[in-house]
Amino acid sequence: MKKKSGNKIEKHALHIPFRYILSMLIIIFEFLGVIAATSVVTIFVPYFYLVVLLTQICCAVAIINSKDNPDYKVPWLFIVLLVPIVGFMTYFMFYSRRLSDKQIKRIKSINANMLKNDTGAALNCKKQDEEAFLQANSLKSMSQSHIYQNTDIKYFASGEELFESLLADLKNAKEFIFMDYFIIEEGLFWNSILQVLKQKVAEGVEVKVVYDDIGCMTKLKGDYYKTLQSFGIDAVIFNKLKGQANNEFNNRSHRKITSIDGKIAYTGGINLADEYINHVVKFGHWKDVGVRLDGEAVDEMTRLFLIDYSMSSKAQIDFEKYYRGYKKENSGFCVPFGDGPKPVYERRVAKTMLLNMLGTAKKYFYITTPYLIIDDELTSAIENAALKGVDVRIITPHIPDKKMVFMITQSSYEKLQKAGVKIYEYQPGFIHAKTYLCDDKYAVVGTINLDYRSLVHHFENGVWIYNHEVIGDIKKDFENTLEKSLQIKENGVKIGFFRRIFRPLINIFASLL
């Protein structure tokens, strides 16, 4: 039920469609059934407990020898070794983040559709700054992207600003509109867009929409894609929940992409729901950001959309059909990139990119993130930058959207502060922006949070920017946001009795949240 507050609307009660409830019940029954069967056999079959013990040991050995980050191994070892039967059954069902054979097959065909060679932009970048080229080259190699010039970039300091611009560009679409979002929810934002999409379909414009099934679980009807299809929109669900106890809850598409005619593209932290434009009030003022690309780099954004679409649809796609090579004169450089689980991305793209940026920082490194749940390697890189004398500042929310996750975020403060990192909380409410800014030279805007979901499990995307005038706009917005934020001093977070007891235990499982 919605309740009005002035001209805005407060959050309403969650509604989960029956399809999702049924899928979750199937997973629970599957999980409990296997555990019950194993337990019964252990009781009634002589010496079967030795098989259970051996299985438990084998699982522990497999976890230790895996290539996963130690922060991810620890909670799984804890589960497997301390909870007999339940522990290793949980491991068998949920540890793997492997994609399905069908998805892998689709990805192989997708990877054959690489974009043009970017030797010209790469050489220009190398001539201008060897260090910048090495960063860009590393990122493009890991993400199978390219280095681009000839692209204007506009920065939006709020969802409201992006909403207005996005609607105007959608209305001017002539050939195709592609939209890929983690969350879509009916309301002013999405309904305004949908009205334009329906009009564009009537005009003969090709419209495709991808939305994540779990991201929209409490936002849309379970068969909402059929509603969109009835309007002539080619809509598909990313990684549809089917009630299988495997990787369904991992490997989500957390991407936010709009590509219009292969000439204009949008990305950033902004989903298509009313809290992102502060039409609905959930956690105080919602601070978010985005960017608009206008030029040849849009081809890469189109390709990222088509990757998600192809993983979710049976349709055969001619990728080249949608590449335009459209250029808007600009000497700045950018690398639009994707990130996600293996085998799509063999390396941790976003994490490695951040490590590279931190390693080269000389003056400052500014971060905005809704969550701060990072492994030891990234923590050490942030600390080392501060210890060198780099001005490292991180802005997190003051009003959280997830209290347990916020508890872990705040538990990260003290260690970083002791190294000289300055921590701030955005006082007006919740900051959902994901920006990384370094030395007036580099910036990254995209969907990547500083947590395990983004850095390990989800499909993500962003834009790495070098020597582009838009960096000044990003810095100005960071400084404006800083003025509205409260600096958290060392030992400035009050820890009550409950937190003192449970925070160490929760931190063990941080990588699974």
Image (spheres, helix red, strand yellow):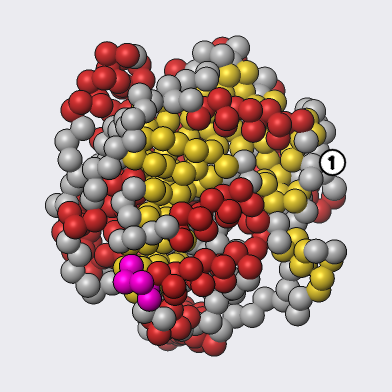
Q: Which residues, given as a range, are shown in magenta?
A: 201-205
Q: Is residue 68 left or right of residue 387?
A: left
Q: Is residue 87 at all visible to an observer of this figure?
A: no
Where is residue 359 shown, x and y percent of the image? 45, 20
Residue topped by disc 1:
494
Question: Horizontal and vertical percent for residue 438?
Answer: 52, 23
Residue at screen point 34% across, 14% down: 129
Q: Is residue 443 visible?
A: yes
Is 203 colored magenta in this rendering? yes
Instruction: Identify the residue shown where x is 23% and y is 74%.
Output: 314
Position of 169 relative to 99 (above/below): above
The relative height of residue 296 versus residue 211 in the rendered view (above or below) is above
Image quadrant containing the C terminus: bottom right
Q: Amino acid at mark 1?
A: Lys
Q: Nearer the viewer, residue 154 or 114?
A: 154
Mostly what secondary structure, the magenta segment?
A: loop
Q: Quadrant of the N terminus?
A: bottom right
- 12 and 351: which one is in front? 12
- Front residue of 283/26: it is 283
Is residue 307 part of the magenta span, yes or no?
Answer: no
Residue 131, position as x, y percentages in the image: 35, 16
Residue 132 in the image, given as x and y percentages of width and height:
36, 20
Helix, strand or loop at mark 1: loop
Neighbour tally class for label 1: few under 14, some 14-19, many 20 plus, Cα within 10 Å: few
Residue at left 47%, top 35%?
444
Q: Quadrant of residue 109?
A: bottom left
User: Residue placed at 31% from the left, 68% from the top?
Assistant: 206
Residue closer to the observer: 213 or 462: 462
